[in-house]
Amino acid sequence: MAGVRNSKRIWGWWWFDWANQPYNTLLLTFIFAPYFAASVAPDPVTGQAMWGWMNFAAGMMIAVFAPILGAIADNTGPKKPWIWFWSVLYVAGAWALWWAVPGADQATIIWVLIAFGIGLVGLEYGIIFTNAILPTLGDRNEIGRISGSGWAFGYVGGLAALVVMLVLLAENEQGVTLVGIEPLFGLDASMREGTRSVGPVTALWYAVFVIPFFLWVKEPPVPTVQLKAAVRQGLSDLGRTLKRLPKHSSLLSYLLSSTFYRDGLNGIYAFGGIYAAGVLGWSIVQIGVFGILAATIGAIGCWIGGRADRRVGPKPVIVVCILTLIIVCCIIVSTDRTMVLFMPVAAGSTLPDVVFYICGGMIGAAGGAVQASSRTMMVRQANPERMTEAFGLYALSGKALSFMAPGMIALATTLTGSQRLGVSPLILLFAVGLILLLWVRPEGEPKATWDAENATS
């Protein structure tokens, strides 16, 4: 019976990935972001820059408070009440995107960007707390498989939501969906209501599919402390952790490495759809098909990556994925409607489209696998007694310099006036992350080191 109960907990934890993935798939990458840049913002270049500054601001907020909240949560008992709160932000932020009308005025644009940022904060903080539950779901050898399978399940959820949007709701320039029908429920295609419904759809998707997580994921009993005392103790513990961090060279190197390569990955996700719309002239439906390809291959990549993680450990998986993403970025920067790999193509050639579809598959496979293996690596590197705090630091490492990718892209786009050249800084971010991995121990710190440190805390 214990095995059955734990299997149900694992499935409940996987359902959280299924529920939250559409914020990334539908909003951040394939539907809303390119729609915002192409139809809501004054022009695509300005839209890409505005999207970059919004991601910068949200990332800074996440970076500042993530480790503090993680430290506090380790002292307040159950994590699910926190996740309830972050879920409210997620749903409210996503739903508000309905008001992103085409050609919106400046006040509406700012409101839409703020709403998206609120939802993004809810998403990221919720992930910190659910990731901290991961070590309780299986032993050390099983964590990689559980993480990889969960990420694959999430990709399938994102794929399913994307198909629903493309087939039934998101309209192209002719006012019809991917299968040639008008958007359902009498939505006005001329006002892009089918595409704008992506916000409410994402909110409802999460609200429904997160239910198994809250019902099935029972947390191990932990003592509950009053919030005031937990805040005081959490801040004290965080300060002690940060002070000791330089003594844990492998953990420090991993946090620094992931700061760069995960920021690069977030840059690809945040600007891939915008790039396709502005540089290649793709419609929302074309970008959605691109997303279906990326999500499908991404789910397979996560599943394979999880098995590889279990067999050889997370570090080799991360290295291979980063190298793949560097290659993808080089291809993207050297490709537009007139050339592929800097070589001219005939006018009207579909080769740039084919190349970008291939890049989408590579991004999906490498991006999914590297994220799944990254959280497995964090489990190996972290203090077992301070896991939520550790994932707060992990979120910090992913967001502390999160202004780099969107900020560098926004700056490069503004200075060059080119969306293609604007994404070139991502190559540097991946390269730095790869170099820093050289100092990361595959198995993390010895258990005796953490036991001794916990005994003196």
Image (spheres, rainbow, N blue to C red):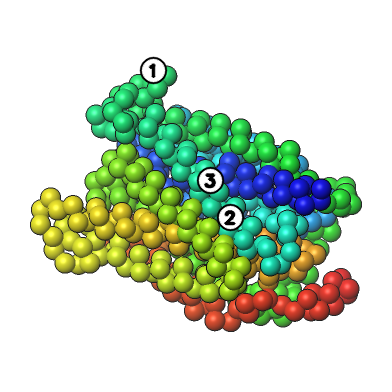
Residue 397, by quadrant, is bottom right
Marks 3 and 2: in contact by CB < 8 Å? no
Q: Position of residue 119 (x, y in %)?
A: 56, 41
Residue 186 image label: 1
Q: Is residue 168 left or right of residue 43?
A: right
Q: Which residue is mark 2?
A: 149
Given residues 14 and 434, the one toward you in this image is: 14
Given residues 354 and 118, the one toward you in this image is: 354
Sequence-first tag of 2 and 3: 3
Q: Position of residue 222 (x, y in %)?
A: 86, 52
Estimate how packed mark 2 is, as few (under 14), some (14 to 19) or many (20 or more) residues with alpha carbons within 10 Å: many
Q: Position of residue 195 (x, y in %)?
A: 38, 32
The residue type indicated by label 1 comes to Gly
Q: Position of residue 300 (x, y in %)?
A: 47, 55
Q: Secondary structure at mark 2?
A: helix
Question: Alpha-carbon distance for marks 2 and 3?
Answer: 14 Å
Residue 21 image label: 3
Q: Secondary structure at mark 3?
A: helix
* Closer to viewer: mark 1 or mark 2: 2
Quarter of the figure with the C terminus: bottom right
Sequence-first tag of 1 and 2: 2
